[in-house]
Image (cartoon, grey):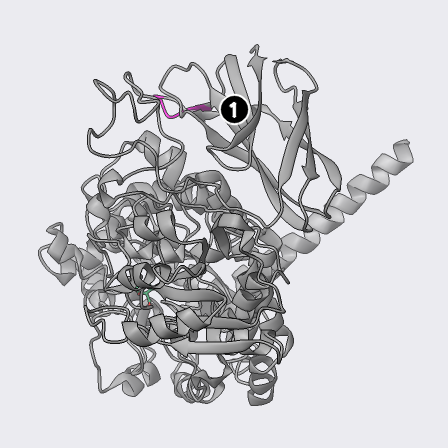
Amino acid sequence: MIMKKAILSLGFIFLSFIMFSQQKSLDQKVDSVMNLMTLEEKIGQMNQYNDDWTATGPATVDNDKATQIRNGQVGSLLNCMGTERTRSWQKIALESRMKIPLIFGQDVIHGYKTTFPIPLAESCSWDLDAMELSARIAATEASASGIQWTFAPMVDIARDPRWGRVMEGAGEDPYLGSLIAAARVRGFQGNKPEDINSVIACAKHYAAYGAAIGGRDYNSVDMSDRLLWEVYLPPFKAAADAGVATFMTSFNDLNGVPATENKYLLSDILKGKWGFKGFVVSDWGAIGELINHGTAKNSYEAAESAIKAGCDMDMESRCYKNNLAQLVKDKKVSIALIDDAVKRILRVKFELGLFDDPYRYCNQIRENQELNNPEHPKAARQIAEKSIVLLKNENHLLPLSKNIKTIAFIGPLVKSLKQNKGFWDVEVPGVDSSFIVSQWQGLKKKVGSGTTLLYARGCNIEGDNKEGFPEAIDIAKQADVVILSIGESRDMTGEARSRSNINIPGVQEDLLKALLATGKPVVVLINAGRPLVFNYTADHATAILYTWWLGSEAGDAIADVLFGDYNPSAKLTITFPGSVGQIPIYYSHFNTGRPATSDTNRYYKSAYTDLSIYPKYEFGYGLSYTNFNYSDLKLSKKEMKGNDQIEASVTITNTGEYDGDEIVQLYLRDRFGSICRPVEELKDFKKIQLKKGESKTIKFIINKEKLSFYNQKLQWAAEPGEFDLMIGASSKDIRLKDSFELIN
Ligand code: GLC
């Protein structure tokens, strides 16, 4: 035994020496470059420009970019894609005195060429492995196209669907959002940055951008530190713990201090308490926007505030390039701050292998192979199927029979290609849209020769033109079933797309009404990037699939679900309001002193007198073609002492006619606390596959960590007392309950 311990400890010492020497050699490499650099060259590394292609913000056009790069005044380019173009810029960078390679960044948010469902849609799969694979494939294609850095995952918790950027994240819940953040970082970064199929990831937008007042993009955010720590920071911490290489500051001010100059966020928490060793990039022009915020009189002051707060790289504002040298000369900014920022940036470039081979991501043969890898669309189709939420299925209309005679496929989104890609898709140079599978194509491929497919556009997405109605009604009358594909256009939800009215636009619901008047059953596909309000559709359609924007394999995935080749399993990760007037509305709310518990008793209750207290669809909601029975909830003990754990087991049975997946959710309620505690909080979930008739018993572990929260003093702690334990098919559809007590 003693010998064994000795060998183990020797092994540990050896391993630590290896790791230390590797890290030491990396730091030595960085220092060896730093020692040769001038101040101007160091500042150049902190400067990021947009390439001359698509701008994702208000662009400044330099016509001497090549000269600046050749002079070592630029460290990174964004929105530059393809092995050819990135190689051409890299070649110029290597003509500089220090020959420091550029790092190329891109918003590879949900796929590069192969386009996956928008992140909010993917999150409804609750399938962490699938989301990790999605990020992995995106990284593989992007890295094959000259890109080393994606500005993703966006991990902003969002509870206001008026905010267009809800489409980029993982919904409203910090527990689920944290797991998804880590999965996406792992997918993008792989096991190590130097892995050729990896890109470095970027946790954004730090922080609390999703809480913009009124859901109005770029608006102020004001919240208690307790809420910030309890709800908005956890996914960022999860990304940092997963080893994310970079962070991006958010546009918003937080409690009066813009995030880009927020020392509390960037230095005290991120680089201090969390020990973050990567680098922080500002969002587009955000340093310069400090002048608009009114916390800097000019770009000189803006640069000073941002660098002192801990922002290492300046995306597109040019404040660093134009002012940092003077700030050092004026002794306003210490060279140590510049050195720290540059070391962080150079360390990442070394880890990516860019110094060893600046052209390693510029291999055209690999680019062609990966962008045409047949495995990628297959993965995209699978996660797209898992992202489709079945909201309604009256009379078990779905799945459709493959022997159905006539289908009328109607709507402005049926034959579109690019609409399926949603916002934040990538326009890959030299690649057209022909690889995208439209919803029409998907259905045509799926149905047999015995099925007649009829088509009519019916109307546009926006506008009040109803001239197409008669043709649509006519083919509906000929059909056994109508499929109506309606929703938003892909640029209606995304950055700078806040909307005060989140109804289905135009006359699309009028078209539904006209089609229902024919007496035919209607399946509605809703294509959107956010929760929309569609009460007429919800109350009258026969069946509803929320198909989001599913990406380049949308058509096949939708057809698979319509005909039951995939049994829908997705569940909502964001609350769907019944009216925009209900917002903000989310499931893990406090009880208040006058809780409204029904729509019939709202007098002197925390409720609107003119609106239901319930959302249209709650967090965790989603139907299946089969049914699941929950039974035999058992707790291993009813009291938890110290660091005990409680095991909760429950049996799930597929009692329906189809094999299917069920997302079993575990919620806890801390009945009494030193501060108010939410009426329920998601603390675990299991996604299980069950063949029809099959039962499985699953186990959840409850430990003190799951009972802990930030108290008034911002201490993370669990408090003794009673806890309700709820097992649900959604946050509202609680199937089984029990309780236990934390003794100390
Ligand atoms: C945009 C977005 C950010 C993106 C960046 C670069 O303004 O806010 O998410 O990564 O600019 O495109």
Residue 659 placement, left or right of 410: right
Look at the picture and state if 720 lies above or below 322.
above
Amino acid on which the number 1 mark rests in the picture: Leu
Residue at position x 37%, y 63% in the image? 518
Measuring from the top left, give residue 276's x and y in whole percent: 46, 48
Q: Main secondary structure of the magenta part?
A: loop
Look at the picture and state if 502 lies above or below 374.
above
Residue at position x 47%, y 19% in the image? 670
Measuring from the top left, give residue 173's x and y in whole percent: 43, 40
Look at the picture and state if 94 lies above or below 77.
below
Residue 240 placement, left or right of 196: left
- For the C terminus, which image quadrant? top right
Query: How many numbered discs sit on the rendered protein?
Result: 1
Q: Secondary structure at mark 1?
A: helix
Q: Is mark 1 within 8 Å of ligand 1?
A: no
Among the 4 quarters of the image, the one containing residue 484:
bottom left
- For the N terminus, which image quadrant? top right
Q: Does 713 lie within the magenta span? A: yes
Q: Is residue 354 visible?
A: no
Q: Does 342 lie within the magenta span? A: no
Measuring from the top left, give residue 359's x and y in whole percent: 52, 83
In this rendered view, identify the residue nearer to me: 379 or 79.
379
Residue 450 placement, left or right of 259: right
Q: Mark 1: few, some, or many residues within 10 Å (few <14, many ≥20)?
A: some
Residue at position x 47%, y 52% in the image? 277
Q: Which residues are magenta?
A: 712-716
In this rendered view, identify the residue nearer to me: 724 or 368.
724
Measuring from the top left, give residue 635's x and y in whole percent: 67, 20
What residue would you read off at disc 1?
Answer: 707
Among the 4 quarters of the image, the one containing residue 191:
bottom right
Q: Quadrant of ligand 1?
A: bottom left
Q: Is residue 674 visible?
A: yes
